[in-house]
Image (tube, grey):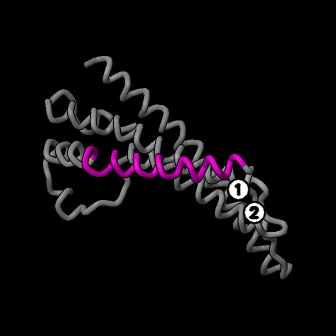
Amino acid sequence: MEFLRKICNAIDSFNGWIGNLVAWVTGLLVAVVFVDVVMRYAFNTSFVFTQELEWHLFGFIFLIGAGYTLSKDGHVRVDIIYQRLSSKAKAWVNLIGGFLFLFPGCLMVVITGWKFTYNAWTILEGSPDPGGIPYRFLIKGTIPVGFALITLQGISMVLHSIFQIRGLENKEEHQV
């Protein structure tokens, strides 16, 4: 059991580190959007590169930060029922939901996204627009990576749920 706790702690710590990285990238996105808005309204000009960089950064934040969001229990769910449940009942919902929805969904995206990503990396895909980002393959690479991070955090969530069901920890104990 102690070995499984160490695995959970390692996963939680890793996704905590990823969350910090994503926070810095979010700051970068704010700066890029600010520059784009100033260029557009103050100088009446805009660059394809800047606009593409905005959605590349947003895609990175969304995909790579999803595992961290799961570690903080921040994903959207039907809270009308869930919020009224006991800690043990919530653990059961997380355990069953992990196996019925989270793992199959992530596996489907990783498997189907892998070929999509592989093809982009094989040809070093870039933007089709003149002046666009020449490294579009990089953002496509975050699709399987992001869902692998969610899967990894899902393993931790399921293990924590098992610990809670067995009375070996409280929900508050495992917050990153």
Residue on which disc 1 sits: 136
Residue at image location 43% in from the left, 44% down from the top = 150
Q: Is residue 85 above or below residue 159?
A: below
Q: CA distance from mark 2 to mark 1?
A: 6 Å
Quick check: is 12 in the magenta stretch? no
Relative depth, front residue between 160 and 56: 56
- Residue 50 in picture, x, y percent from top left: 76, 65
Q: Is residue 49 above or below residue 95?
A: below
Disc 1 residue type (three-letter): Arg
Question: Which label sits on residue 93?
Answer: none
Relative depth, front residue between 15 and 147: 147
Label 1: few (<14), some (14–19) or many (≥20) C-alpha neighbours in 10 Å: some
Relative depth, front residue between 83 and 77: 77
User: Which element is circle 1 on?
Assistant: helix
Residue at image location 84% in from the left, 78% down from the top = 45
Label 2: few (<14), some (14–19) or many (≥20) C-alpha neighbours in 10 Å: some
- Residue 72 in picture, x, y percent from top left: 38, 46
- Residue 86 in picture, x, y percent from top left: 13, 48
Residue at image location 20% in from the left, 43% down from the top = 91
> Magenta residues?
98-122
- Residue 20 in picture, x, y percent from top left: 56, 42
User: Which element is circle 2 on?
Assistant: loop
Quick check: is 117 in the magenta stretch? yes
Quadrant of the drawing holding the N terminus: top left
Residue on which disc 2 sits: 127
Quadrant of the rendered image containing residue 172: top left
Q: Is residue 76 left or right of residue 36?
A: left
Disc 2 residue type (three-letter): Ser
Quadrant of the drawing holding the C terminus: top left
Dot 2 or dot 1: first in sequence order is 2
Residue at image location 84% in from the left, 82% down from the top = 44
Are circles 2 and 1 on residues that touch, CB within 8 Å? yes
